Image (spheres, grey):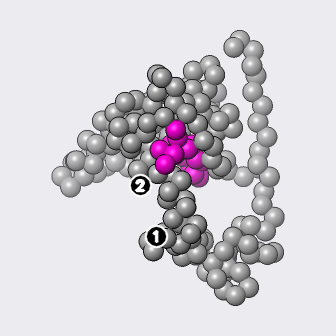
Amino acid sequence: MGKFFFSGSISAKLDEKGRCVLPQQMRFGLVEEGVLEFSLALGLGGCLAIYRQSDIQKIVAKFQAKQHLGKYQKFFTLFFSTLHQTTCDKIGRVIIPQTLKKAVGIKTDVIIAGVLNKIEIWPKERYESQLEAVLNGQDSEMNLAKMTEEAFALMGDDQVGKNEQGNAGFFAVGRGPCANPAPMPEFSMDHEGE
């Protein structure tokens, strides 16, 4: 079986205590060594990010090597002062601290999106407006074809993800990551004791 990654998105609402339910499959992806613990932090582009504990430990190790460089001090202060190590309650809810909600403009409605090694929590309005802008070609910096081409170029094969006309796209037939995708792993959860 291949390495697990987060994908998919759902719409959710925060309750009066600032909690939202993480999808079950995403919660399973956060479990390491039988424990559901993770870190909630400011993400890129106006969202929050949830990292597995093993991923946050790698980030911390790399940052510690640079902690004495003055040019990073403000970033380190911001990143670590807003980093929250947390878990979910028995029904899968995670509390979003007021500081983080305010920082990214979350009110009640959110989109929870799986993105490779992290889970992003977006204010619903921002997520939907950015998605619409990309899909409708309204933002020259966020051109879907260009972003797709650049992302697939990271794989080292400039032909991966291109269609018959040589344009970037997700519909490459018979080659690239879209041809014969691997099935998602099946998960099970023991509900005893809940």
Query: Which region is colored magenta?
Result: 109-125
User: Which label sits on residue 139?
Assistant: 1
* Classed neighbour count for the residue bearing mark 1: other residues with Cα under 10 Å, few (<14), some (14–19), many (≥20): few
Task: State the image coordinates of residue 4 (x, y, percent, origin top left).
Answer: 67, 47
Q: Residue at x 63, y 43 (%)?
A: 10
Residue at x-position 28% and y-position 42%: 78
How far apart marks 1 and 2 lie (CA) works out to: 14 Å
- Number of numbered labels in the structure image: 2
Q: Mark 1 belongs to which amino acid?
A: Asp
Quarter of the image for residue 146 reads bottom right
Q: Horizontally, is 102 left or right of 35 in the view?
A: left
Is residue 105 highlighted in magenta? no
Determine if residue 6 is in view: no
Above or below 89: residue 135: below
Decide whether residue 119 is among the magenta residues: yes
Question: Circle 2 sits in a helix, a strand or a loop, which is it?
Answer: loop
